[in-house]
Amino acid sequence: MNTKMIAVLALCAGVGLAPLGAAAQQGGMNRDGMADGVVRKVDKDAGKLTIKHGPIPAMDMPMPMTMVYRVKDPAMLDQVKPGDAIRFTMDKIGGQYTVTGLKAAK
């Protein structure tokens, strides 16, 4: 077993399920695979959203951050404005992080 695998297993064992709830409260990934965030900027011309969110370990984002994302469907940009709390999914498409779905947070 390599060192990276041991580190991942140790992290999983030490974390348990409780931090999933904490991550969701801090804007991280939820159990349903969506992340919580706040829209900081909508750039319709570039087809991008700036989102402030918590850690998203599944996407190699271990720290809270604000990042610019492409959107898969430009129509998504009409659904949000700066300051909106959102839930979103993303994937790496063509080497770039891309928002693949979003909805208003409740």
Image (cartoon, rainbow, N blue to C red):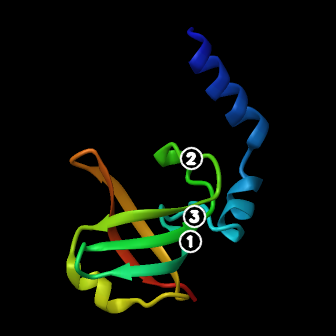
Position of the C terminus by quadrant: bottom right
Q: Nearer the viewer, mark 1 or mark 3?
A: 1
On screen, residue 34 versus residue 62, left or right, reads left
Q: Look at the picture and state if 92 lies above or below 73.
A: above
Q: Which residue is mark 3?
A: 30
From this view, report whether residue 17 is shown above or below residue 84. above
Viewer-proximal residue, 84 or 15? 84
Mark 1 vs 3: CB contact within 8 A: yes
Which residue was labeled with disc 2?
57
* Amino acid found under the numbered disc labelled 1: Asp
Mark sitting earlier along the chain (1/3): 3
Residue drawn where x is 50% and y is 80% of the image: 39
Q: Nearer the viewer, residue 13 or 68?
A: 68
- Regarding mark 2 in the picture, which secondary structure is present there? helix
Question: Which amino acid, by three-letter code, is at mark 3?
Answer: Asn
Q: Which residue is mark 1?
A: 36
Q: Residue visible at 56% across and 10% down?
A: 2
Which image quarter: residue 43?
bottom left
